[in-house]
Every structure is written in structure tokens, then in C-alpha cells.
Image: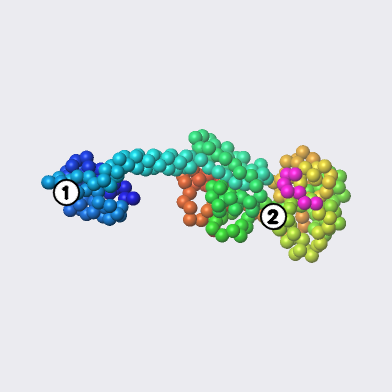
Amino acid sequence: MDLEALRTFLAVVETGSIRAAADRRHRSQPALSRQIKLFEEDLGARLFERAGRGLRLTAAGRQLRRDAASILHHVEEVSRRVREAAGAARRSLVLGTSHHIALHRLPAPMREFRRRHTDVLLRVVYGGSEEIVEKVVSGEVDIGVVTLPSRRAGLVVRPAWEDRFVAALPIGHPLAALKQVPLGRLSGEPLLLPQVGTTTRAAIESAFRKAKVPLGSVQEIPYLDTIRVSVEMGLGIAILPETAVAEAARGRRLAVRPLSGPPITRVLGIVHRKGAALSPVEETFVSILARAGVSSPPD
């Protein structure tokens, strides 16, 4: 239904003539008459009939007059709710990331964001990088901070940090006596690794393949910080980002040694939906994250 035509209809009813309604609506009389005619054609019913020099409502017109006020009121109410929802969306932010990234990369940026936007509701959704990427694409999450690369289409990707991997060893392990640990020396050791299918696991497996070193006994553990704790308990050796083990190494809860050969690295980055304009709140958060990282331009 044409809402402007409905308002014109009510103006004719209230003023009693096309001419008076045209003056009220700031329209020419012929233009307003044509609008009423098209409205009647759209509804499939005559709304007015001539009564001497004036107009009289038909049965259909009388029914529309009874319903028109509630129709317009309902439309205004829906518009108000949409505006309120849009305003709430602009003042909220849903961030998706992993537990590890949240613990080791995001505390300072999130504190800065909270200082600058105390009125914004910030909600964090935790999950694996692959899961978070899907939530960004679906719109469940506004901004994701994940392990790259993401092969998912429909994303704007901005690299932010590079993590270098090291060997994490239980205190007293013989390999801790080395200055650098070759991958070949890990082949016969019990390894604690992230789950198959994650980007981090793929980077580790790729390094072993390139070095032509077979993986030995592997225990899969879903969270990097759980892997670190397992190393501290002496359950095996891990290959972890330096950020995951730096504090434990300083506290002498485990030993950390560089890996010899080509470095194993992973890139962490910011992702959001391509083609979806960022709100001012989202732009602020992305700029804070970019400054905290390497500030690479988006792909």
C-alpha cells in the first residue's frame, strides 16, 4: 500500500475536497487527483463518488477511513522500533576471537576501547578461528580477530600480528640443554599439538613436511593454553607461539627454546564482512586493533 497516497486520502476526507487537500499537501490539484485515481486502481475499489459539488465516501472509502489511522500508527511504530534497533546496533559491538588471542593480544586494545566508549555494550564470542570466521560471514559477529589465512570469501582481511613458534619443554627435559631444537629431535618425543583442521596445526604439520620429519606420538588438545599447562605438568613437548609461553618461561614453569631451521610462524588478523559498512564504533575498534598490531592495510 502506498502510504503517501493513504495520507492524501485522509487529507481529502478531512478537508472535504480535492482542492483543499491539495493546499494542505502542497501539491497541485491535478497531481493530487491523479494520485487518488492511481490509489483506487491499486486497491481495486472506488473510494469517492460525486455528491453535488463535493465528494462522498463509498463503502470501500468508509472502510479505509476506519482502518487508515491504525495503519499509519502501526507504520510509525514499526519505524520507531527499527530506528531504536539501529541505534542500539550502533552502540554495541560483538567481537569474535579465540581464548588464546583474547588472553595474549587483546587486553590492552579492549581496555583502550572501553575507556573511549563507556556507553558501548561490548560482547565477546569465543571459538576457534574457523568458527569465528563463519560467524562473521553470517553476521552473528561484527569483527573477528583470528588466525590467518582465511580462505572464506566475503571478508575484508587485515593482518595485524605475527606469532613465531618455539619449542616448549618440561623443566629438566634433555632437549632443554640445547640452544636450538631441530625438528628432527622432536620426532620421537610425545608431542602435544592443536587439533587437526586448525590453521595453527596446519602450519606445524607443513613445517614437519618441509623438513621431511615424520610426526611421532601426538596428543591433540583443543586450546593452546591447555597445551602449555600440559607441558608444565610434564605430559609432553609442544610447539607453541612465544606469546603463549613467555610468562610461564619467566616463572620457570617450563623451558622455551627456539626451533632451528626456517621459522614456523602464523599471522593473526582482523576480519569483517566485505560490503558491509562499518559503524563508527566498529571503525574505532578496528583502528585500535590495527595500531596494536602491525597496521597492515586490508586485503
Q: Using the rendered image of the protein, determine whether residue 152 is visible from the camera's viewpoint.
A: yes
> Viewer-proximal residue, 249 or 226?
226
> Viewer-proximal residue, 249 or 208?
208
Give the side of residue 142 with respect to residue 201, left or right. Answer: left
Residue drawn 55% across and 39% down?
Answer: 122
Q: Which residues are magenta?
A: 219-226
Q: What colouring style does the render use?
A: rainbow
Residue 17 percent across, percent down from the top left: 17, 44
Residue drawn 76% across and 46% down?
Answer: 227
Residue 204 percent across, percent down from the top left: 73, 57
Quick check: 143 above or below 14?
below
Quick check: 117 above or below 196?
above
| Residue under pointer 2 | 198
| Residue type beneath disc 1 | Arg
Give the side of residue 148 with respect to residue 39, left or right. Answer: right
Give the side of residue 212 with respect to residue 3, left or right. Answer: right
Task: Give the mark nearest the N terminus, 2 or 1.
Answer: 1
| Residue under pointer 1 | 50
Residue drawn 52% across and 53% down?
Answer: 273
Residue drawn 28% across and 47% down?
Answer: 60
Quadrant where the C terminus sits is: bottom right
> Viewer-proximal residue, 94 or 238?
94
| Residue type beneath disc 2 | Thr
